Amino acid sequence: MAVQKHSLPSFFDATTEAQLVRVASDLGAREVGGPLSPGEEELLGQELEAPPLIGESLATIRRAILGGADPLGEMLRELRAPTVRRALGAFYTPPELAHSMVEWVLSQRPDRVVDAGCGSGRFASAVVRKRRDVEIVAVDIDPLATLMTRAVLAVLGHERASVLQADYTAMDLPRIEGRTAFIGNPPYVRHHSLSPSQKLRAQGRAQQLGYRMSALAGLHAHFYLATPLHARHGDVGCFVTSSEWLDVGYGAIVRDLLLNELGGQSLHVLEPTAVPFVDAMTTAVIACFVVGSQPESVRLSAVADARALDHLHGGRPIPRAALVDATRWSQLLRPSRHNGEEGFIALRDIARVHRGLVTGANEFFVMTRERAQELGIETWCRPAITRAIEILTAQGAVRDGSDRRVLLDISEDVDRTAYPSLDAYLRLGELPRNGRPPVCEGYICRHRRPWWRVGTQRPPPIVASYMARQAPAFALNPDRLALINIGHGLYPNHSIDQKALHALVDALNQDRERHRGAGRTYHGGMEKFEPGELESLLIPADGPWR
């Protein structure tokens, strides 16, 4: 689906949503898609507040739509602030992704296509441009989105369409005799923004299918859950979402559905360095499925960008049994160089990994040496590693120095009242801060006794970064600096001399690029390693650390 560039009228440089509604109406939104919803009627009732476009401007928009562009969707993206779009999970699908997904869906010869979370109608219109005979059902909870979809379908002259302003996860979809294809980019809304009733409804539906649904699941997982309830045996689907569900706990519901009711056929993951959605720093995975099937293997592929998707027909077959046994599927895309090789052991055989100290308020507990001296509390501070960049750029060892920041580390038995400077600073932590609650009332601090006791932790001999857009880095900690939770600490299981520690750090760093994919990938290539995931990294068995 080649998207042509068009010169849009100046109207599109500065406008309002009311004007966009007027354009949708002038393009024919009322005439396509069936009865209007109350929400759509309300918006259209305000259209007279906006002047109509002159004929040539409207014609330019029509030509853009007919040529494969999405001028209405682009305008809405410009109109709405990123915070508003994030609340709705409205991150529109790039044409390259939509093209491959539509090609795959139409190759399954559906009688009806359901555009789940239709936005401005990118999928629905792409389908119509390829097959004018197919029935379209476009669903979105946003009435402005459904009006835009109606307008686009009107311009394309497609009459076999139902456009519904509805919640895809809660609606009733009419059954048909033929095959239905589900396609979409489900809204990327994290669980924090979902209501308790949404979560309870999803958990009840998951239980109905025999699964447990985590309350931490985002809205895209809810869309996956709703689909087998809308579908019948033999229906097909193709969704693009954030790829987080491949590895995290809440994603178990999606993995289970693809292995069972949804009948997953293939997964195509865009490499972490790609940023597939404008304004959304998240990775992407496209899943193709045939409802009710249970293939012996599922094809998995990792591609550098959307242009390498090859119409979603590629991929390496992974036995279904391997997917059932795996709790983190991204590792199956990038098997370790050492898998199946002799002569390697897991890092946990040599060392345990622990998180750094959690302060609960770094801005209070971490400061420069000069600041600690000014406050008269340097006696209760110790030098610390407080930023991940210190490990990532350490080149093998993090050292103390005059510019190193310090950590407030007070033993629990200190009588603070005996030290006026210390007591004065702790009192600052017990006062409100610019309208915010006191430090002592933060979640971490209020669960400690006393609130200012950060805790005891032996300085780790080796430190590691755990979250970055690059592989984890390892460094010696010869000056035994304290470590806060911007990094992890490695603690050998038995006594290891300095030479062996140095060799272990070298081995881990030399092989660090091989560790990519062993963590959990977020936000455009940000990869996170929990302690257990670092402990699973493989190292040579014959090193001096044994």
Image (cartoon, rainbow, N blue to C red):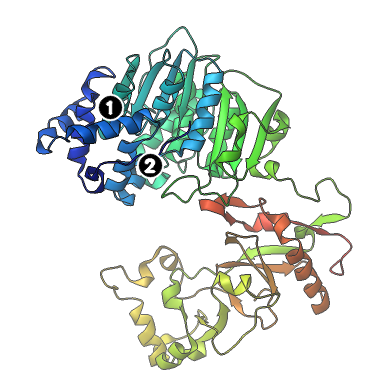
Judge whether residue 213 can be spotted in this image. no
Residue 300's x, y, as percent? Answer: 66, 35
Residue drawn 84% across and 45% down?
340
Judge whether residue 425 can be spotted in this image. yes
Q: Residue 365 got which mark?
A: none
Q: How many marks?
A: 2
Residue 43's x, y, as percent? Answer: 17, 33
Q: Earlier in the sequence, mark 1 or mark 2?
A: 2
Q: Which residue is mark 1?
A: 151
Secondary element at tag 1: helix
Residue drawn 60% across and 50% down?
520
Residue 251 lies left or right of residue 327; in this view the side is: left
- Closer to the camera in the image, 323 or 393: 393
- Closer to the camera in the image, 66 or 345: 66
- Graded by Cα atoms within 10 Å as few (under 14), some (14 to 19) or many (20 or more), the crowding at tag 1 reads many
Residue 197's x, y, as percent? Answer: 34, 35
Q: Residue 89 got which mark?
A: 2
Residue 61 lies left or right of residue 315; in this view the side is: left
Instruction: Give the quadrant of the C terminus.
Output: bottom right
Residue 12's x, y, as percent? Answer: 25, 44
